[in-house]
Image (cartoon, helix red, strand yellow):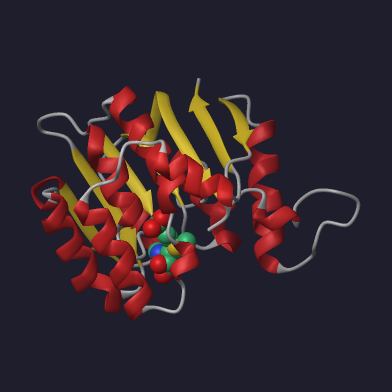
């Protein structure tokens, strides 16, 4: 952790015990702790959720549940978070984290592939957080907007918010020589699709690895 991050954490309200537990478990049980939203992005998601008070939240790519707990912070009475994760080996740690955060009765964990799960969802979401397979971001967007060839209904409405993580991809998506690997290509295509879509208003916040924050018009 650098001095700036230490300063920010020292001068921000502390996060709860559940998030600390999830972060510890992530380090103990996986080799990919860098995938966690972490303190700053997590606090931002929590802040958005508290400001928006969304009734229905969809999370694509749950990992160990850190961002779920942040997103669920602003759910009103009767609200629900649907969380989609492909890796069933993470299910027990996700569920225990939800229990510790006291959100298990407001969350529905859907183990499966986002591309298969999204068309089956019979909901319209107020807030969607995209953080699953970077190669597939454009397909998630098409499914959410109701543009996919299968003809499933849109999962967002006028006034919904779509937030996608890692859209600057460590700098590999801009500059003279954007990288041609599949993940960079996926994110480049996603950012272009969002910017070109007249139904969306967006901007990219350069926090951590970049968040693309879009409102459905
Ligand atoms: C960057 S991590 C998510 C981190 C999490 N949102 C957080 O902040 O704590 C990406 C997750 O997406 C999952 N994933 C990748 N492809 C997926 C897919 N097609 N459908 C569902 N989950 C997927 C991975 O297994 C991984 O757990």
Quadrant of the displayed image that contains ligand 1: bottom left
Residue 142 visible in the picture: no
Residue 62 % position (x, y): 35, 59
Q: Seen in the image, is 181 located left or right of residue 75?
A: right
Residue 19 visible in the picture: yes
Depth check, front residue: 171 or 118: 171
Depth check, front residue: 85 or 26: 26
Locate residue 182: give its quadrant. bottom right
Residue 206 % position (x, y): 63, 39
Q: Is residue 215 above or below residue 164?
A: above
**Looking at the image, which residue is at 60% across and 35% down?**
205
Q: Is residue 60 above or below residue 182?
A: above
Depth check, front residue: 158 or 45: 45
Locate residue 23: give its quadrant. bottom left
Residue 151 % position (x, y): 44, 46
**Looking at the image, which residue is at 32% across and 24% down?**
52
């Amino acid at each position: 952790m650098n001095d700036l991050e230490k300063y920010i954490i020292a001068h921000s309200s502390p996060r709860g015990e559940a998030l600390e537990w999830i972060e510890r478990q992530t380090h103990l049980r996986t080799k990919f702790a860098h995938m966690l939203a972490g303190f700053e992005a997590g606090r931002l998601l929590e802040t958005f959720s508290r400001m928006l008070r969304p009734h229905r939240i969809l999370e694509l790519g749950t990992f160990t549940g850190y961002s779920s707990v942040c997103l669920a912070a602003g759910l009103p009475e009767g609200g629900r978070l649907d969380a989609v994760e492909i890796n069933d080996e993470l299910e027990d740690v996700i569920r225990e984290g939800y229990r510790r955060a006291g959100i298990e009765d407001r969350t529905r964990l859907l183990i499966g592939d986002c591309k298969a799960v999204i068309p089956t969802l019979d909901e319209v979401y107020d807030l969607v957080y995209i953080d699953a397979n970077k190669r597939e971001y454009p397909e998630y967007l098409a499914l959410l907007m109701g543009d996919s060839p299968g003809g499933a209904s849109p999962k967002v409405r006028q006034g919904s918010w779509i937030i996608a993580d890692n859209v600057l991809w460590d700098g590999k998506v801009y500059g003279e020589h954007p990288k041609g690997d599949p993940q960079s290509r996926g994110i480049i295509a996603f950012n272009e699709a969002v910017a070109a879509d007249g139904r969306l208003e967006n901007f990219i916040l350069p926090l951590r690895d970049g968040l693309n924050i879009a409102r459905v018009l």
